[in-house]
Structure formats: C-alpha cells, structure tokens
C-alpha cells in the first residue's frame, strides 16, 4: 500500500479494497448544509483523516444504498474552484485528479443553499465543466419558501441537464431521493452543453439560468434583521458581545467544576483500590501514580473541554460566531489579524489543537500562520490544573475590593497576560516576518438559524476527540515513563531512614533526580529547585503532567495523609527554607503562561504549517518569554514580599 | 458588458463623484448601489470578490457597519457578506442602474 493510502483513513481507505466501491464527493460553499447531508447519508459513521501531503482534514463515510456500499466524501467548503485557501486547493485538485494518491471521485453532489443560489451557481458552473456525473442537492428549500422566495427545481433540472433534488437536511426531507440516485451514478443524465468558462459569459449564463428557473430571491430574514439591529448596534452589540464572553467563561467554571470533582473522585477510588489490592508494588505504583495520576488528572478536564466545544459549536451554528468575528475584526486588525483569528483564539481557550485547526478558514496564509503561532499563548484548559493548584496553595484568598478576591484576580491576571501577549506578538510578527501587503478580508454573514442538535453534538465531539487522544497516548506514555525514571535505578536506603526519608533518598538517586539536578543552573534564576525541574521537564509533554508529577514527588516525601497542596506548602529544602517561596510561585505561574509545553500542539503546528521551522520558532520564542517573564516575576515578587 | 482593467490612479479607492462613480466603501448604510467594476483584477482578493458575486451590474445594499465602523455588511445576490474598507474600496459602484452606469463609463472612455 502506498504512503498516500496510509495517510488517508489509517490505511483502510475503502477505495483501495478489492471490489471498488463507488466514490461520491460532496462539494459546496461553507454553510450550504454539506455536513448535515453527509451525516444524514452516512448515519454519522464518518471517519476523519488527512489528505496525503497536505494538511486539510478529509472526512469520508459509507452510505448503504440498495445493499451496496457507496463511499461519500465530504469535501471542505469552497466558494469557487479557483482556489484561494489551502482547503479550496484540495477540492479543486481532488476533482481534477491532481491530488497525488487519490483518484478523482466517480461522481459529485453539489450542495447548493436555495437562499443563496445566485452566488452558488458559479460553483455549479465550474463543477459541471469538470464533466463527472453530477447531482445537485438544493438545501434550505423550506427557508426559501418561508422567506417568500421561489425556485422551480424541475426547471433547474431540465436546464442544467443533471438530477436536482430539494432537501431539508435537518428534517430528513429529500434524503431518500438522494439515496435512490446514488445506486447508479453512471446512469445520471449529463448536461448536453457544459456551462461557459469565460467569466463574462458565465455571469450571463447565471442570470439566464436564474430567469428560466423563475428564481425569486428570498426576502431578508426577518429575525436576522431584527437580531442584528441589536447584536451589531454600536453600543448594544459590544455590550452583548461582552456578556456572551462573560457567560462563556462563567459556565466553564461554575457548571464544569462539580462534574470535574466527581470524575476526580472516581479516579482517586481506582488509585486507592490499586494500592490496596495489587500486591506487586511496581504494578500498583504504575497504576496509582502513572495511570490515575497522569491520565486521571487529564480526564478530569473533559467536562470543561466538552462544555467549551459545545458552546463554540452552538454559537457557530446559530450564526453568532460570524457576528463575533465581525465585532472583533477591527480590534484584531490593529494587531494585523482578522475577525476569524478571534474565533480561533477563542477556541484556544479550550485547547490550542482545535484552535489551530480552525485557522483553516482564514484565507491569507500569513494571517493564518500568525494566528497559529500565538494560539498556544491563550490560556488553555491544560494550564488550569497548574494554576488552580498553585493559586489555591499559595495565594491568600483575601478580599481585595467588594466581591473581588485575590485568588480570582490572580487567575484573571494570568488569562489576561496570555491573551494580551498573544495579540502583541501577533502584531510584531505581522509587522516583521509575516507582513502582508494587503489584508484580504471577506466573510459570509449567514442568517441566524436554529441549529440541528446532531450537527452541534458531532462537531463538539470531533473537537474533543483530540483531547481524549492526547490523554490516551502522550500523557499516558509520559506518566508511565516518568514513573520509571523516578524509580530507576532502585536504591536501598540506609537502614536508619524512616519510610519518608527512604522515599526522598530513592528520588534523589533516580534518573529523574539527576536530570533535575543537571538543569538546575538554567532554572536557578527563576527560583526553581531540582524537584520543580523534574516536574517542569515532564510537563514539556503536556502541562497537566506538572501537577501529577509534583504529586508523585511531594507525596513520596511527605506522610501519606496530606494532599498535594499540603505537601507543597510544607515542602522544605535540606537547609530548611521553603521549596516554594512567593517568588518561585510567581515565576512558575508566569512560566506556564508563556511556555509551549505541549507535544500535541507542536505536532499539530508541524502538520498545519507543513514545516518544522514554525513549531521550532514557536517553541523557542515561547520558552524565551517564559524564562525572561519567570525571572522578572521571581525578582520583583521576592523584592516586594521580602 | 465587460470588465475593464483600470488605471492605477483610479484604483486608489477615492470617490469619483464627478463621474457618478464612487467606491463601495464610501456608500452610506441603507443605500443601494450597482457595481460598475472591480479594480486590480490580477489580485487574488479581487478575483475572490468576483467569485462572491461582485460582478458588473450587481445590485448591492449597504446593510450596516460593525460596531467599530469596520467591516461593513453588504447584501447582494440574496446573501450577506462583510468586507473591510480596503476591499470595498476596490469596488467601484454607481447610484444609477447598471446600464446607466456602464453607459457613463463608455461615454467617458470614448471622450
């Protein structure tokens, strides 16, 4: 099997099986309802992979019609087959057979939104010119009728010379007709005459088609008009935007927190069960420290991630995200970015991986790279366990003003520091290395719609999957490796040592211990001792690992009863000084704001920018910021607190 | 109806009130105008503006500006699209209907 086949669908590309199934590609502009049709046809049995050699995700699924399997491929949304963005390039390459390793599909379904058919006919004319068997699925026919528009689908069918089916994806209307046609794409009627390719003739062709199908453009969406009057009002619009964002973060902290504790207690239960019931100590340790400490800590954050993505997916499908992008475009423009960058950065508050992937909708490659490079500075949910642990342990919860307490303010400050730095750095990048001569910006403003819950849930799940995969692979791996490094070589403590001292002795003489000591000179100016260094190095794989590592280290050295937090507060160096004086805590917090400690992010950057240079650059600049920021935080706080 | 390439001078995006032409960016929200031409056709962004339907003769309603005055939402060919000033400045429009506007340009080029 070729490398290309491997890249698609984990090597199980259905097209490469012995009996070759018919492959049908869905083409359509963004928001046309392509994905809804795809889900209806394949019954959510879609698979995602990547197109070989490029970084655009590929989703394929199987529809069974008449006892026969048909492979449906959901192509990225595109306005035109003359490509501008990487996604559009893939669509035009795939259809023309220019995509290495993938044959062009056997047939195409062009998904056309009835309410914007005037614009979509351009894509139709380009797709028909390719000459593959083609069917046209006209979506949103209910909305067109509701808004007083009209379109004669039978006439459209006879004029274009290809099958035309009207569908309402959310209600399942017309899906059966599409399925029936999928039995034999070879038998679909073909256009007698291909549409013209010259732009001017094409414009004339479009108006003549519209006239002959008795096209009546829909009236403005009444609700959209009213809602926009408020949501895009100079004062009200900004206020609503602010409230939506406030609500967004409020939900994460208030709704997700109890569920989080609940998951945490389940894993704690598994951990203590393992310690009590597994007699072979290394296995018990591996399960309770490695598995529960590593993967369990991360899975605790799943509710938060799911909620974040649920809200993002909902806001996007309702139509608010494009308004948010619109409201923020001017502000983002000041930093050389555009409105869509804002949406990507917002997703990065949950996790930088889907945030970086969502930059695919940004047509300008320079804006896209700038957004990718700063996305990891947004405070992702993986930083939260670190922040909460350190803040809860070391920052006094004194009242500062009214309901504002110091702990909350510090957390808010860390979010703010990350976000503001992201914008400033984007601005610097766009003024230097990524300067673009003009800032192309166009964006469709779809009418508000009540989204289908299936679509919202599917999108939410697709984004959360990456987070789970990270927990199952990278974090599990590092936790296990770390456990080994902490316990190898196994040394025998002098007999006069008690259990606690013996554990410290083991730690000091382990491989991890010597690594921690080796890098001491680098982190000394930030106030980190060798124990913190071990946790810091371990957290290069994923930030959350910091907490579980500290847990493993400190718990080993203190008595069994105390929590990680208590162990940290009481931890002392051999000379009796605390391991975590205020300066060190401040330096650690600032270090985590900036440092790129996440293998998944680096991997996705590598994939999305198709280079090693950009992830390397991101890692270096973020490390430099983290070190310098940590140094200043340590110096200033130490001088201030004394 | 044809799309002409225009001189650099006109591509600057300033209003052309004397010719009855003005840049789309300078039209006040609430007004309806007609596209006369899109300047600097070689540019990929301009190509995309044509893909999105900004073709000569197209009726464009300026819907509203974003809270911070930029970008602006335009309604054309049954859907709403937002453009920044910079892009809207590349689109020359007329308050007259398409045929009138093209007649004006033809006259001026002949003269």
Image: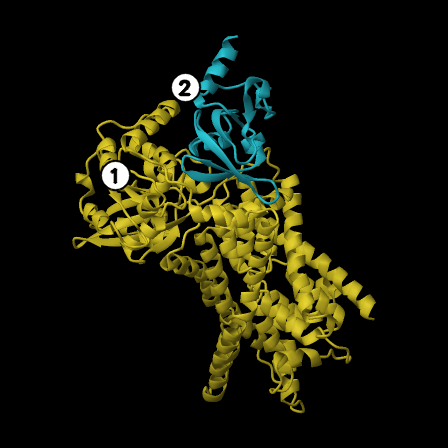
Chain colours: A yellow, B cyan
Q: Which residue is mark 1?
A: A153
At which x and y percent is residue A322?
A: 50, 48
At which x and y percent is residue A602?
A: 54, 55
Say if mark 2 contacts mark 1, CB within 8 Å: no
Label 1 residue SS: helix
- Quarter of the image for residue A106 reads top left
The residue drawn where x is 62% and y is 77% is A553
Neighbor class of circle 2 (other Cα within 10 Å; few <14, some 14-19, many 20+) is few
**Compared with residue B74, is residue A13 higher up or lower down, i.e. above or below?**
below
Closest to the observer: A81 or A486? Answer: A81
The answer to whether any part of residue A548 appears in the image is: yes
The answer to whether any part of residue A529 appears in the image is: no
Q: Which residue is mark 2?
A: B1
Q: Quarter holding the C terminus of chain A?
A: bottom right
**Compared with residue B93, is residue A615 higher up or lower down, i.e. above or below?**
below
- Quarter of the image for residue A500 reads bottom right
Neighbor class of circle 1 (other Cα within 10 Å; few <14, some 14-19, many 20+) is many
- Quarter of the image for residue B20 reads top right
Label 1 lies in what chain?
Answer: A
Q: In the current view of this chain or complex, which residue is farthest to the top?
A: B111
**Compared with residue A63, is residue A414 higher up or lower down, i.e. above or below?**
below
């Amino acid at each position: 099997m070729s490398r290309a086949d491997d890249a698609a669908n984990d090597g199980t590309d259905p097209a490469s099986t012995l009996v070759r199934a018919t492959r049908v590609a869905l083409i359509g502009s963004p928001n046309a309802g392509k994905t809804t049709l795809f889900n209806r046809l394949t019954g959510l049995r879609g698979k995602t992979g990547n197109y070989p050699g490029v970084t655009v995700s590929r989703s394929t699924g199987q529809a069974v019609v008449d006892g026969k399997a048909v492979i449906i491929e959901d192509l990225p949304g595109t306005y035109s087959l003359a490509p501008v963005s990487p996604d559009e390039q893939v669509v035009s390459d795939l259809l023309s057979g220019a995509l290495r390793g993938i044959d062009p599909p056997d047939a195409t379904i062009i998904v056309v939104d009835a309410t914007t058919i005037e614009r979509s006919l351009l894509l139709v004319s380009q797709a028909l010119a390719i000459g593959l068997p083609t069917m046209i699925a006209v979506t949103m026919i209910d909305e067109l009728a509701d808004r007083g528009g009209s379109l004669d689908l039978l006439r459209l069918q006879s004029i274009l010379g290809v099958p035309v089916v009207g569908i309402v994806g959310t209600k399942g209307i017309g899906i059966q007709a599409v399925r029936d046609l999928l039995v034999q794409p070879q038998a679909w009627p073909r256009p007698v005459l291909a549409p013209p390719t010259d732009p001017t003739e094409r414009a004339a062709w479009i108006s003549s088609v519209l006239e002959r199908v008795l096209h009546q453009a829909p009236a403005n969406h009444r609700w959209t008009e009213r809602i926009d009057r408020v949501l895009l009002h100079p004062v009200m619009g900004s206020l609503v935007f602010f409230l939506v964002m406030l609500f967004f973060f409020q939900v994460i902290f208030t709704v997700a927190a109890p569920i989080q504790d609940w998951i945490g207690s389940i894993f704690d239960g598994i951990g203590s069960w393992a310690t009590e019931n597994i007699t072979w100590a290394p296995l018990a340790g591996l399960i309770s420290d490695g598995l529960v400490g590593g993967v369990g800590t991360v899975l605790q954050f799943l509710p938060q991630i799911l909620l974040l993505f649920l809200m993002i997916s909902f806001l996007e499908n309702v139509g608010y995200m494009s308004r948010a992008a619109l409201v923020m475009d001017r502000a983002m423009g000041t930093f050389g970015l555009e409105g869509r960058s804002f949406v990507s950065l917002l997703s990065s508050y949950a996790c930088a991986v889907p945030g970086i992937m969502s930059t695919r909708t940004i047509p300008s490659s320079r804006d896209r790279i700038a957004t990718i490079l700063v996305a990891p500075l947004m405070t992702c949910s993986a930083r939260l366990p670190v922040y909460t642990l350190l803040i809860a342990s070391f920052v006094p919860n004194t009242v500062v003003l009214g309901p504002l307490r110091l702990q909350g303010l510090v957390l808010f400050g860390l979010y703010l520091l990350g976000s503001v730095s992201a914008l400033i750095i984007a601005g610097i990048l766009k003024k230097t290395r990524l300067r673009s001569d003009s800032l192309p910006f166009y964006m469709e403003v779809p009418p508000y719609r009540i989204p289908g819950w299936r679509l919202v849930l599917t999108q939410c799940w697709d984004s959360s999957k990456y987070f789970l995969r990270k927990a199952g692979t990278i974090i599990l791996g590092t936790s296990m490796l770390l456990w080994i490094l902490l316990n190898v070589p196994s040394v025998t403590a002098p007999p006069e040592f008690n259990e606690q001292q013996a554990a410290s002795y083991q730690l000091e003489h382990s491989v991890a211990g010597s690594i921690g000591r080796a890098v001491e000179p680098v982190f000394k100016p930030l106030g980190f001792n060798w124990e913190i260094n071990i946790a810091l190095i371990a957290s290069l794989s994923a930030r959350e690992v910091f907490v579980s590592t500290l847990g493993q280290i400190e718990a080993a050295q203190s008595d069994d009863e105390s929590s990680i937090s208590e162990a940290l507060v009481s931890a002392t160096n051999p000379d009796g000084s605390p391991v975590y004086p205020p300066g060190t805590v401040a330096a650690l917090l600032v270090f985590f704001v900036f440092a790129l400690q996440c293998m998944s992010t680096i991997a996705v950057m590598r994939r999305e920018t198709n280079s090693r240079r950009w992830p390397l650059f991101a890692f270096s600049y973020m490390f430099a910021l983290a070190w310098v920021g940590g140094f200043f935080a340590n110096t200033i706080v130490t001088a201030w607190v004394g | 109806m044809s799309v002409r390439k225009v001189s650099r001078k006109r591509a600057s995006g300033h209003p052309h009130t004397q010719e009855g032409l003005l840049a789309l960016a300078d039209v006040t929200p609430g007004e309806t105008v007609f596209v006369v031409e899109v300047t600097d056709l070689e540019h990929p962004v301009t190509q995309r503006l044509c893909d999105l339907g900004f073709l000569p003769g197209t009726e464009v309603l300026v819907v509203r500006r974003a809270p911070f005055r930029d970008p602006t939402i335009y309604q054309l060919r049954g859907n709403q699209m937002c453009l920044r000033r910079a892009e809207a400045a590349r689109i020359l429009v007329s308050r007259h209907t398409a045929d009138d506007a093209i007649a004006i340009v033809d006259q001026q080029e002949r003269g």
